[in-house]
Image (cartoon, rainbow, N blue to C red):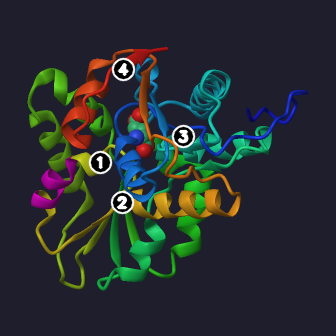
Amino acid sequence: MLQSQNSPHRTTAAPNAPIGVFDSGVGGLSILQALQLQLPNESFVYLADSGFAPYGERDEAFVLQRAKHVLHILLGQHHIKAFVLACNTATALAIHVLRQEFVQLPIFGVEPAIKPAALQTRTRRVGVMATAGTLGSAKFQELHRSLQDQAEFVLQACDGLADAIEQQWQHGDSSEVLALCRKHLGAMGEFGKEAHQMDTVVLGCTHYPFAKPLIQSAVGPHVSLLDTGDPVARRVSQVLHDKQLLAGPEYPASLQLLATGETSNLQTAVRVWLHQSLPVVCV
Ligand code: DGL
């Protein structure tokens, strides 16, 4: 089991140990989907911090304390060999501290794909949808500053959108998600291929890929929507390979689902989006 830097009990992780994946709720499933495709032999433990979601409008101390708590559960009870913060907000506010405290553990995060967006935009205008926590973080602001001469980024804090995507299962319809997409995109400006329009939109919260059809229909078919699932999965695969921590085909791959609060949203989302019927354990 991998331990905190200060722990006296350091041991080495086993290649057949699971990879821990974490988000405030169901959004991280968009990253898990890419991880399962890229790493079909791996076992995963997915934890949704549903008892304390959403994170997007919470402060740094709160998100950091939750991320540490989740990591302790995944290390202590599931002996994970790597940790993926499948949440832009938690990455922006907590990953630097976790990496300092858990030096032996490979820790991966996600961040809004504004670098690839700057490379591919032709109109040099890019829309960025993310939580207020992500956009307000020092980590994002530094990334934004480093790319400011390459494109103009229109930043939109999409308050309420992640939560509406989370809750749509309980309401049984997506009208709230649609209304919030229209409201936030409407506040950003014009989308399209003309010089003054945004031709690229970054989905900077892992919940938003699950609203992709609604967002695409609101911005039109010629606008590219960028998320981060595939690049993150490739990076995890590369690092685990280099550390000789990849599971071989001799181990049966599995997926365990955990939630700190409400469990039915996660169970339904996994069935609908990942086509897997699994129980969710409350932790
Ligand atoms: N899915 C998360 C993100 O990528 C957080 C959403 C939330 O809890 O507000 O930012």
Residues shaded magenta:
211-217
The reply, left or right, for residue 108 in relation to residue 242 is left
Q: Is residue 216 within the magenta segment?
A: yes
Numbered circle sitting on residue 90: 3
Check disc 1 and report its element: helix, strand or loop. Answer: helix
Which residue, given by chain and number where applicable, does mark 4 sit on?
Answer: 280
75 lies left or right of 38: right
Q: Nearer the viewer, mark 4 or mark 2?
A: 4
Of labels 3 and 4, earlier in sequence is 3
Give amino acid for label 4: Val
Question: What percent of the width, then of the height, locates residue 192?
Answer: 17, 75
Q: Amino acid at mark 3?
A: Ala
CB at disc 3 and ligand 1 closer than 8 Å: yes
Residue 241 position within the rendered picture, expressed as x and y whole percent measured from the top left: 63, 61
| Residue 70 colored in magenta in the image | no
The reply to whether dot 2 and dot 1 touch (C-beta < 8 Å) is yes
Identify residue for label 2: 227
What is the spatial separation of the Cα atoms under label 2 and label 1, in whole angstroms?
Answer: 9 Å
